[in-house]
Amino acid sequence: MRKIIFGLLLVFSLNAISQTEEKVLPDIHGNYLGIAAGFATGTIRDFLTSPLSYTALMPAINFDYKLYCPKSIFSVNFATIDGLYITVTHDNTYIATGYKFDFDISYYRLLEGNSGGGLKNYLGLSTGNFSELYINSAFGNASSTFDNFTDLSLCLKSDWTIIKPEKQKKFLWLVKYKSKEKQYLLSGKLGVPIVSLMYRPAFTNPGNSTLNDETLFPNYSMKTKVFSGLSTDISISRILKNGNMVRFGYYWDFITSGKNALNRIDMSHHIFTVGLIYKIN
Amino acid sequence: MKTRIIIYIIIFAAISFYSCEKIAFEKKTETDPITTFNYLWNEVNTKYAFLEYKNIDWDSIYVIYRPMVGSDISDDSLFNIMGQMLNELRDGHVNLFSQFDISRYDITLLGPENINSRIVKENYLKTDYQTTGSFIHNFIRDKKIGYIIYPSFSNSLITDFELDYLIDKYAETEGLIIDIRQNGGGYVSNVFKLLSIFTFTDVKAYETQVKTAPGQDCFSVLEEVFIKSEDRKKYTGKVAVLTDRGSYSASSFFSVCTYAYDNIFLVGDATGGGLGLPNGGQLPNG
């Protein structure tokens, strides 16, 4: 199985970065499929079960689809980060596990008055659903917690195409060579969750260690929160001549259920990824 | 030059946004003994469901135990004080865990065991008893009665095979004795599974509610809990359930549920209780 996955990834990546001999740099339009992998860190502090802050150490995988139109962008994104949460006290180290799934759909409209040259600014809406199963045996009967957040966000997105012109360079001050013209896409996104629906334990979290029908979710509730956090996504992509891209991204977000919430949770993610974006037409 | 300015702006923005996280999040909790003690006292004060029911004045408990905790107290002394404070709740489900000990309120000492395993073996189980899953069983009284010891609800989840086997074996008996003496409880789902073999219709077993806010009287609305009649073989004879003080938690659930049945009756001492679903959590010092 590993060999098959490795083979598919190899073929996918070689196909993505293989260059054509075209001289003209391609525009960014049409359909793109992306796959990225990386590393995530962050914190979780679920006040229902612990006043301690746990630090996340997790591998991250991201799949996305984007449709670039002349005046809009449509995107679908799925990410999963599964791994460990760790906290250290004066006499012990506690390790929990977390399984997170994030799915969101976004639509951005070009702000024509604020765009020009290589810079394109977009205003958009994004709706997403984020689920997490958090298991910490140190919490006894509250060892399993399931959280689900659905939000509607207002997003500001900027794409800036940078062209690095052809240059004569020297390697170690001796060997002359010509650096070819390169095209980059610098992207930034700021998302503000206008309204969020939070489904999680309401005040206590009893009996969930048994994970059976009678005791799981006995005290969960759905609550609405306005402006529950913030998210940013910054990336730089090297646009290859065949239209594919190699992307280096940093995603950050935080979610809080609010200081006065009976079921307060503070959570943040910092995700660093490297990926390939494959132009499919 | 322009590229660099943009990159600097993005880096500056990222740092600014990161600081938002710090502002929005709660500050780090202190881990000193007094903060830890206060945290535990407050958790019980706001989340323990039976303070009013048990007529426990939790404020007066604070007055007794708080002066015992100083800022330089050792971990084991703090543990012992907090363990003693928790025992004021008189609840076998309340434990304090540390690396070196687990505090407990031993409900089995509240009454006699009412069971002598040697007598049970010599006179009832004898040597030809069977063990099916967690059930230890045999015929007694010339095969007129089936005697089943169920020592724990937590060993494993009861399987359909185990139940079908027991029903087939004891189908012709006049009655069953289910012995849950010294059964400390376990999976509540096993309660429902085992009781499903004694009914052809869904049975309302009890009503339940959970704590929803810090106030002593803040509970959710009562919800009815039913034992579902699963599509399976049934036992239609009479059933006696043997209990004692060591029958705790899921065993108490089991005992309470039998009140809903006409053909099941309890024999023995009062159970140890433990009908609340335990919550869990961690203290500031871990």
Image (cartoon, coloured by chain):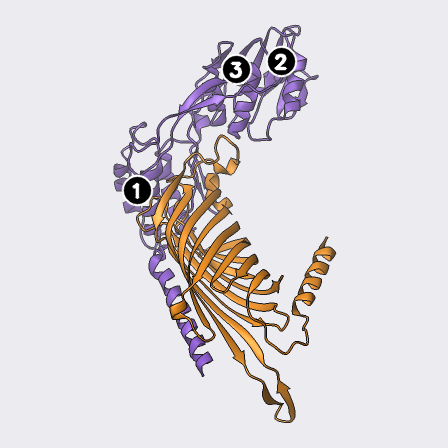
Chain colours: A orange, B purple
Observer-nearest residue: A139 or A196? A196
Q: Residues within 10 Å of mark 1 (few under 14, many from 20)?
A: some
Q: Is residue A25 in sight in this rendering? A: yes
Q: Residues within 10 Å of mark 2 (few under 14, many from 20)?
A: some
**Marks 1 and 3: which is nearer the front?**
3
Horizontal side of B160 relative to B111 (left or right) equals: right
| Three-letter amino acid code of the residue under disc 2 | Tyr
Q: What's the mark number on residue B124?
A: 2
Q: Who's the residue at 51% across and 52% down the image?
A: A102
Q: Residues within 10 Å of mark 3 (few under 14, many from 20)?
A: few
> Disc 3, disc 2: CB below 8 Å?
no
Residue B60 position, x and y percent, is 25, 37
Residue named by callout 3: B201
> Disc 1, disc 2: CB below 8 Å?
no
Q: Earlier in the sequence, mark 1 or mark 3?
A: 1
Q: What's the mark number on residue B65?
A: 1
Distance of label 3 from label 2 (alpha carbons)? 33 Å
Which chain is indicated by disc 3?
B
User: In terms of secondary structure, where does tag 3 sit?
Assistant: loop
Q: Who's the residue at 74% across and 57% down the image?
A: A3
User: In terms of secondary structure, where does tag 1 sit?
Assistant: helix
User: In terms of secondary structure, where does tag 2 sit?
Assistant: helix
